[in-house]
Image: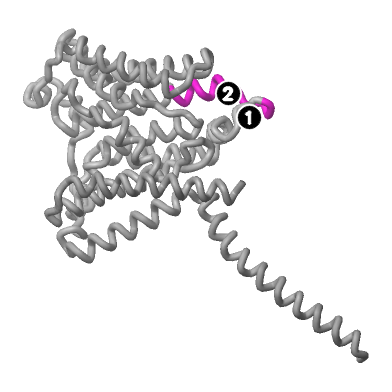
Amino acid sequence: MSGPDNYEAASADAANEIASFDTGKKGIVSRFHHALHTTPALVPLIVLLASIAIFGVLLGTRFFSPFALTLILQQVQIVGIVAAAQSLVILTAGIDLSVGAIAVISSVVMGQFSFRYGVPVEVAIVCGLAFGTMIGAVNGWLIAVMKLPPFIVTLGMWQIVLAANFLYSANETIRSQDIAEQAPMLQLMGAKFNVGGAVFTFGVVFMLVLVLVLAYVLKHTAWGRHVYAVGDDPEAAALSGVNVKKTLISVYALAGLICAFAGWALIGRIGSVSPTSGQLLNIESITAVVIGGISLFGGRGSILGTFFGALIVGVFTLGLRLLGADAQWTFLLIGALIIAAVAVDQWIRKVAA
């Protein structure tokens, strides 16, 4: 072979080696980015498993016992249910600051209808669920039809519902003993049962079923795809035939219904109907959603990620409590996780763009 031919062959081999090296390097990084982009729940799942492993090593059987692990589920059941509602809203690139207030006033309606008006408890519960749905639908109508910003609408609704809650209930708490004697069905979500040493409540079961149902609906139904499409780009969604207004109203109405169920579960959790309960549910639900990997810009994320985010908060809370650490460490670590989660989301979006 002549000299030029040898030179060209060597140059081609070297170019192929360099090209294959670059492709391999980019392939590993791109596959990792692709996994994070297509599976947003992956990051919170990794954080959750790492947290469980760390506290398990530090605490041993005190943390890994069936009772302790199911206690985490009991502690996060209310936040988990409300966070599921918040997830639907944030997937549409909105936000709902009224979720906690809706949950509380729904529980108050259930209690007051049963005790003040003597309505059958089953009917009172249905009325509370309908009331929460109605408030959510009003939020959706103001946002979708009147084109008002979700933050402003739900901030105002939060104040209105909070005030109405105290005015309607006259700031009175219906005692747990009275509920147990006269309307025990109000406490149904708090009823416990044992499974192999693990203690569950019907509220925990409802949360798990809700997460699984919403995960399926969002991934395998037309409505679920519409929710993602509206959150990603409402104008493009409208051009592709999606009824953006109808989708938004349905999302906020469903979120209101889920929050009303959270109000019912709240009665079971604390035993009483209190207008002062659940004051931080709006912030706690947003925390679970953000840590769970749902993008605040909408259109990306999963309900499973939110569930993992709620569990992460529960694991840190219980783990640090068992270690005897100051409660402020929980807020510090959760705050750091929130900032880290948003940073990861921005990084994934930048790479995927």
Residue at 15% x, 53% y: name it. Answer: 325
- Quadrant where the N terminus is found in the figure: bottom right
Q: Which residue is the extreme one toward the top?
A: 117
Q: Marks 1/2: CA distance? A: 7 Å
Give yes or no for residue 240 being in the magenta stretch. yes
- Please, what is the three-letter code of the amino acid marked with disc 1? Ala
Quarter occupied by residue 53: bottom left
Q: Nearer the viewer, residue 67 or 351?
A: 351
Residue at 25% x, 14% y: name it. Answer: 163
Residue 298 spot, x, y in % from top left: 51, 35
Q: Indicate whether 174 appears above or below 83.
A: above
Q: Indicate whether 237 appears above or below 21.
A: above
Residue 142 spot, x, y in % from top left: 47, 15
Q: Nearer the viewer, residue 198 or 56?
A: 56
40 left or right, relative to 169:
right
Residue 237 shows which numbered tag? 1
Q: Which residue is the extreme one toward the right?
A: 2
- Please, what is the three-letter code of the amino acid marked with disc 2? Val
Contact (CB < 8 A) between labels 1 and 2?
yes
Magenta range is 239-252
91 left or right, relative to 55:
right
Per the image, the residue denoted by label 2 is 244
Q: Earlier in the sequence, mark 1 or mark 2?
A: 1
Kindly state the secondary structure of the residue where label 2 is placed.
helix
Q: Nearer the viewer, residue 118 or 224?
A: 224
Residue at 16% x, 23% y: name it. Answer: 274
Q: Nearer the viewer, residue 202 or 226?
A: 226
Residue 309 shows which numbered tag? none
Kindly state the secondary structure of the residue where label 1 is placed.
helix
The main secondary structure of the magenta stretch is helix
Quarter occupied by residue 153: top left
Give yes or no for residue 116 being in the magenta stretch. no
